Image (cartoon, grey):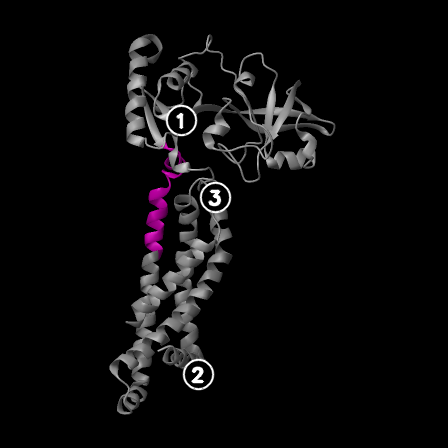
């Protein structure tokens, strides 16, 4: 069987070399269809299919408040404190709020983007600094000494990747702050623009229920579902709304998987686009099938001679199918190259509109998809 297959492959390659015009048209037709599909699949893979870069990210959720007029909204600090104390569905629940600061250096001031966070945000995400440590509960209180955890990018850019940076004091907004940790390369939250994190230091005494400015992320317990978390958080929010009618009347809560929160809005568009380029592949298959039908008419005498010499229908079928697979593999290889070259252009055109764009790449999953698509198209137009 393997000897027959090897001979069929060699024969198919010789046939293609003898008909360069046919081979070129067929391979390029397939390459364009497979290349377009592979490029779009790489976007779908990076944005929708790959998990977020946090351990057991399927347990991470965003928790919003639902306000009577505004709908889905940020969370009031006092409500967050009560959520933390009263829930039984989360291992951890943390708050954050984007901020910015001016880093004063010898070379001059520089504006950097950061996030104010509750002390256990990194534990909630399942992340830990590469160097140093994260925050403690004692550091997340009003009046505590200001401390920072910085990103790997800021560490390399401003501190020359100095391993002794932990414990160094910097001037942030004209006040001293101490670096206590450096996050590992590739870590980001909530976006890749964040260069530092500092304690948010919410004062429970002064926490307001009228100002809504916190993002809330939580890690569900292993046996808890999103539906169960939604039910409990909605109950807590409605109970607080009855207890504090002046500020919280009519408010509720919504629990959403963190990945759905990030990519949910673009999911329908990407899946529609993938289906559309899938039709392009079907059109390519139809075109190549027509080319093969024309070529089969030319090879009619050859096939008749093979049958007269004793070739069975199975052998003839296998040989014709091998011809198709050789074409498909050649088209798939060229298509993968087209996807590799075209993907940066696609991402440039969609800059700012595709979340997790930095996670899009031609990886092993995409190569496997291209190979599977090639074999599937070979089978379709071969049959």
User: Could you tell me how far apart the alpha carbons at marks 1 and 2 are, in whole angstroms?
Assistant: 67 Å
Task: Name the residue at 29% across, 83% down.
Answer: 297
Span of residues in magenta: 257-277
Q: Position of residue 50 (x, y in %)?
A: 42, 45
* Magenta-colored stretch includes residue 48: no
User: Could you tell me how far apart the alpha carbons at marks 3 and 2 are, in whole angstroms?
Assistant: 44 Å
Q: Are marks 1 and 3 in contact (CB under 8 Å)?
A: no
Q: Secondary structure at mark 1?
A: strand
Task: Name the residue at 50% across, 44% down.
Answer: 358
Q: Main secondary structure of the magenta part?
A: helix
Q: Nearer the viewer, mark 1 or mark 2?
A: 1
Marked residue nearer the N-terminal end (3 or 2): 2
Task: Name the residue at 40% across, 48% down.
Answer: 44
Split into 4 quadrants, where in the image is the C terminus? bottom left
Numbered mark located on residue 357 in the image: 3
Q: Is residue 250 visible?
A: no
In-front residue for pair 358/63 = 63
Q: Position of residue 31 (x, y in %)?
A: 42, 65
In the figure, 121 relative to 251: above or below? below
Residue on which disc 1 sits:
91
Q: Position of residue 324 (x, y in %)?
A: 35, 73
User: Could you tell me how far apart the alpha carbons at marks 1 and 3 are, in whole angstroms?
Assistant: 30 Å
In the figure, 246 relative to 231: above or below? above
Residue neighbourhood size for the residue with mark 2, other residues' Cα within 10 Å, grouped as few (<14), some (14–19), many (≥20): few
Residue on which disc 2 sits:
18
* Magenta-colored stretch includes residue 274: yes
């Amino acid at each position: 069987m393997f000897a027959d297959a090897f001979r069929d492959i060699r024969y198919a390659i010789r046939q293609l070399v003898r008909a360069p015009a046919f081979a070129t048209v067929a391979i390029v037709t397939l390459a364009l269809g497979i290349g377009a599909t592979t490029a779009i699949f790489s976007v779908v893979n990076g944005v929708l299919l790959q998990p977020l870069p946090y351990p057991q990210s399927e347990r991470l959720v965003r928790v919003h408040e639902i306000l009577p007029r505004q709908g889905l909204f940020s969370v009031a600090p006092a409500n967050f404190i009560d959520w933390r104390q009263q829930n039984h569905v989360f291992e951890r629940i943390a708050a954050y709020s984007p901020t910015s600061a001016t880093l004063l250096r010898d070379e001059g001031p520089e504006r950097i983007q950061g996030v104010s966070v509750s002390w256990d945000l990194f534990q909630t995400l399942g992340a830990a600094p590469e160097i140093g440590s994260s925050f403690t509960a004692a550091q997340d209180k009003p009046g505590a000494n200001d401390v920072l955890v910085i990103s790997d990018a800021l560490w390399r850019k401003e501190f020359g990747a100095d391993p002794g940076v932990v414990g160094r004091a910097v001037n942030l907004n004209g006040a001293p702050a101490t670096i206590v940790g450096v996050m590992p390369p590739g870590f980001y939250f909530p976006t890749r623009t964040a260069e530092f994190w500092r304690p948010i230091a919410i004062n429970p005494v002064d926490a307001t229920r009228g100002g809504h400015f916190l993002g809330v992320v939580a890690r569900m317990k292993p046996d808890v579902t999103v539906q169960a978390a939604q039910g409990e958080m909605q109950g807590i929010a409605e109970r607080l709304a009855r207890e504090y009618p002046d500020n919280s009347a009519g408010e509720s809560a919504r629990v959403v998987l963190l990945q759905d929160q990030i990519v949910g809005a673009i999911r329908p568009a990407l899946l529609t686009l993938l289906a559309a380029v899938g039709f392009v592949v079907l059109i390519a298959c139809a075109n190549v099938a027509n080319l093969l039908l024309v070529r089969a008419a030319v090879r009619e005498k050859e096939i008749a001679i093979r049958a007269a010499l004793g070739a069975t229908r199975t052998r003839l079928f296998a040989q014709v199918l091998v011809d198709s697979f050789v074409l498909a593999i050649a088209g798939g290889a060229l298509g993968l190259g087209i996807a590799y070259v075209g993907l940066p252009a696609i991402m440039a055109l969609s800059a700012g509109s595709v979340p997790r764009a930095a996670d899009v790449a031609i990886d092993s999953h995409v190569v496997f998809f291209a190979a599977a698509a090639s074999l599937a198209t070979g089978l379709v137009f071969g049959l």
